[in-house]
Image (cartoon, grey):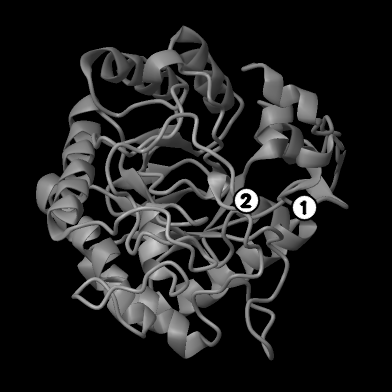
Amino acid sequence: MTEMAALFDPLTIGNLALRNRIVMAPMTRGMSPCGVPGDDVARYYARRAEGGVGLIITEGTVVDHPSSSSRDDLPHFYGEPALAGWAEVVHGVHAHGAAIVPQLWHVGWDPMHWGGKTFDRPAPYPSSPSGIDPSGTAIQDPMSLRDITDVVNGFASAAKTAQKLGFDGIELHAAHGYLIDQFLWQETNRRTDEFGGRSVRERARFAIAIVEACRAEVGPDFPIILRLSQWKVGQYQARLADTPDELAELVEPLAEAGVDVFHCSQRRFWQPEFDGSPLNLAGWTRKLSGQPTITVGSVGLEDSDFLTYLDGGGAAPSDVDDVCKRLHDNQFDLVAVGRALVANPDWPRLIERQQRTRPFDAAMLDTLV
């Protein structure tokens, strides 16, 4: 069918040439001991490239800053052992014809620990814009301007490293309540200096500074993707923008700063973002920014949403007619698939042949296959 064929059309964005519109979504696996991705990580990504994915976005990999990570098993994007591991990942993915970008990440005051939970280890440096959680409870000192500069430099250095290692671009993780998103969200950013403000445009200055610093390091032709969301971990009704005008205040200056692609995370891709329009977050972001977008959110799953696996439930495979029709209608440009690719490394080939896919089950997250 015409709509299904759209999923397998090639796409070129700047210097990034993709064989199809299927993206492997970033999914934290936590299987890099001491921050070093091993041979099993390289094989894991290579299998998805061999299975037909066009673009792989790695799991979140933390930048070089003392409080960028709250767990010892999250992969680093600094230090010789970790970078050697990532070089092997790049080699394996490219050998199977896919492109790959690392997701660069700073967890900030990790939202997985909001609500009285404790860190695996205490954050050694201030790592939140205002030192508060979403309830307004003080959790630490706010970041100083020096802290902010150090983090911006950490992202810029990681971007340059990605280019040197042969990655095809980078993705900046500015979603889900992690550090960049904490600056964007008014509930966690109460600063009164140049990195705060009442409007999302004002609160976007930290994200803009990171984008501009990365762009300065990698030049004009190295793709920068930025992942954004309305929802946060544990705060699923949270919103950065209640209207299209407010969303424009966020995405327009980010595009001007150097974002080439927006990766728009929803728990359910089919849900409209604003009343009066069927467009989802990726559709509105494309319309307002003029930049290509990636949609993501329970693609390839039926009667399921982002939290199904937390309850131990699996999910039946579904057709992808809806997402393909939206793609064919140019509502967005790329489609990111997460859990369906954990269950089916060859998901693109199965979908193209209209073959049944294996249902996702939470137990699949216990191993790296």
Give me the C-alpha separation between circle 1 and circle 2. Answer: 22 Å
The N terminus sits in image quarter: bottom right
Q: Secondary structure at mark 1?
A: loop
* Image quadrant in which you'd find residue 183: bottom left
Looking at numbered disc 2 in the image, what kind of residue is underneath it?
Leu
Q: Residue 185 at what x, y percent from top left?
A: 44, 70
Residue 64 appearing in the image:
yes
Locate residue 200 relative to residue 19 in the image: left or right.
left
Q: Residue 225 at what x, y percent from top left?
A: 36, 53
Q: Secondary structure at mark 2?
A: loop
Locate residue 156 relative to residue 330 in the image: left or right.
left
Q: How many marks?
A: 2
Question: Residue, x 39% and y 24% (percent of image)?
Answer: 94
Question: Residue, x 86% and y 34% (percent of image)?
Answer: 356
Question: Residue, x 55% and y 84% (percent of image)?
Answer: 242
* Image quadrant in which you'd find residue 65: top left
Q: Nearer the viewer, residue 247 or 195?
A: 195
Seen in the picture, residue 250 relative to 152 is either above or below; the reply is below
Label drawn at residue 357: none
Q: Nearer the viewer, residue 82 or 216?
A: 82
Label drawn at residue 305: 1
Looking at numbered disc 1 in the image, what kind of residue is underneath it?
Asp
Q: Give the crowd class for mark 2: few <14, some 14-19, many >=20 residues within 10 Å.
A: many
Q: Residue 223 at what x, y percent from top left?
A: 29, 50
**Residue at the disc numbered 2:** 7
The C terminus sits in image quarter: top right
Seen in the picture, residue 53 relative to 142 is either above or below; the reply is above
